[in-house]
């Protein structure tokens, strides 16, 4: 992709904003940034490598500031549900057409924004529903780095 100077400036502003969101909230930078980047151009697979590097950097900052607050027991319990789904999602990202991925990204963003606007939460007292949400969030995270809303909800 080739960008004009104005588009490069807009991309820099968007990535700066994504970093502030990620550092401030601890999640959500990709959820909110990828749809805006798609308005500039390209497909999700064009943006995800740089978003991945960006998330690693800002996730490291967030994690280093709150390492003592990580629930390691829960993390060990949830990773068997998240990681296989994430790998399946990455395979889907590489094999699905860009138009389908763009629709998935916007649908997730719409769902995320509606739950935020309505101040609603996904609350479950059943383990199998929590595991299903973890699996689904892992898959979405693998396909588009957008599973934060589901993973945080559980």
Image (spheres, rainbow, N blue to C red):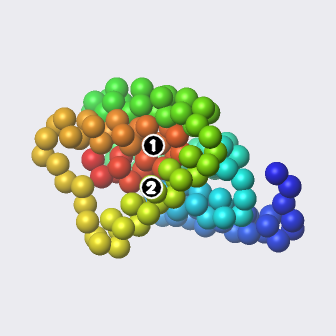
Q: Relative to 119, is 27 on the left or the right?
A: right
Asked if residue 148 is positioned above or below residue 111 in the image, the reply reads above
Which residue is found at the position 67% from the left and 50% from the top? 43
* Quarter of image, res 91: top right
Mark 1 lies on residue = 140
Which residue is found at the position 43% from the left and 47% from the top? 147
Which of the labelled discs sits on residue 108, or is there none? Answer: 2
* Quarter of image, res 93: top right
Q: Are marks 2 and 1 in contact (CB under 8 Å)?
A: yes
Question: 39 or 10, which lies in front?
Answer: 39
Question: 33 or 77, which lies in front?
Answer: 33
Image x and y of residue 80, in percent: 34, 26
Q: Relative to 141, is 39 on the left or the right?
A: right
Image x and y of residue 110, in percent: 44, 63
Crowdedness of circle 1 by 10 Å Cα count: few (<14), some, many (20+)? many
Q: In 3D space, how far apart are the residues under numbered discs 2 and 1 (Cα atoms)?
A: 9 Å
Tally of numbered discs:
2
């Amino acid at each position: 992709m080739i960008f004009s100077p104005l588009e490069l400036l807009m991309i820099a502003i968007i990535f700066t904003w994504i970093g502030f969101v990620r550092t401030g909230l601890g999640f959500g930078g990709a959820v909110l940034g990828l749809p805006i980047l798609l308005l500039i151009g390209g497909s999700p697979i064009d943006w995800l490598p740089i978003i991945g590097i960006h998330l690693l950097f800002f996730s490291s900052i967030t994690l280093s500031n709150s390492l003592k607050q990580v629930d390691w027991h829960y993390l060990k319990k949830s990773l068997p549900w998240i990681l296989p789904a994430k790998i399946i999602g990455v395979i889907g990202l590489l094999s699905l057409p860009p138009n389908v991925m763009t629709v998935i990204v916007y649908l997730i963003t719409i769902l995320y924004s509606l739950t935020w606007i309505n101040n609603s939460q996904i609350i479950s007292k059943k383990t199998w529903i929590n595991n299903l949400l973890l699996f689904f969030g892992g898959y979405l995270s693998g396909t588009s780095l957008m599973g934060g809303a589901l993973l945080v909800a559980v």
